[in-house]
Amino acid sequence: MTYTEMKNILLAIDNPIEKLDLVMDFGRNLESVPNGASCHEILGCTSFVEICVKDRRFYGRADSMLVRGIVAIIIAMVNQFSYKNFDIRTEFLSLGLNLGAGRLNGVDSMIRFFENL
């Protein structure tokens, strides 16, 4: 699923609990990291998170279903758009997800990873 498809579905939902359920569904469908990918642990996340790259395509994994969904959204975003010319933070916040401070710190850590590439 593309980021645009994810965004359109999320923005059509008003209930914050239903949105988070959908994010977890995105996590269930997160593409597996292929063999030979170069992976980097994202520090600053409450959960274990890795962002991986192979052949200029990004992948990710996490040990929490909600965080897997967040990773799926961010990975879809950077694979669809040029992360160097794209404001990942503003775009992610536009989704209106009701995340706690710990999760938002993790999101910031993932975004900083892409900003520092």
Image: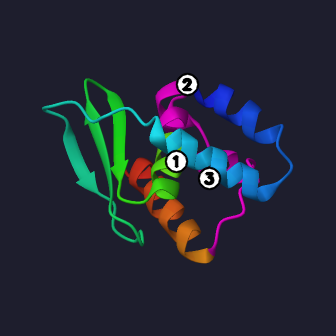
Highlighted magenta segment, given as a residue range: 75-100
From the top left corner, tell me how far across and down residue 45 is, in percent.
41, 68
Q: Is 74 left or right of 23, judged from the image as shown?
A: left
Specify which label sits upstream in the sequence, 2 or 1.
Answer: 2
Question: Residue at (33%, 63%) from the top-left corner?
Answer: 48
> Which amino acid type is marked by label 2?
Met
User: Is 102 situated above or below 42?
Assistant: below
User: Mark 1 sits on what residue?
Assistant: 69
Q: Mark 3 touching mark 2, by CB under 8 A?
A: no
> Which amino acid type is marked by label 3?
Arg
The one nearer the camera, 17 or 53, is 17
From the top left corner, tell me how far across and down residue 100 is, in percent.
63, 73
User: Is 108 situated above or below 93?
Assistant: below
Question: Residue at (53%, 50%) from the top-left corner?
Answer: 70
Answer whether residue 57 is visible to the viewer in this image: yes
Between marks 3 and 2 in the image, the one whose residue lies nearer the viewer: 2
> Which amino acid type is marked by label 1?
Gly
* Numbered circle sitting on residue 89: 3
User: Mark 2 sits on what residue?
Assistant: 1
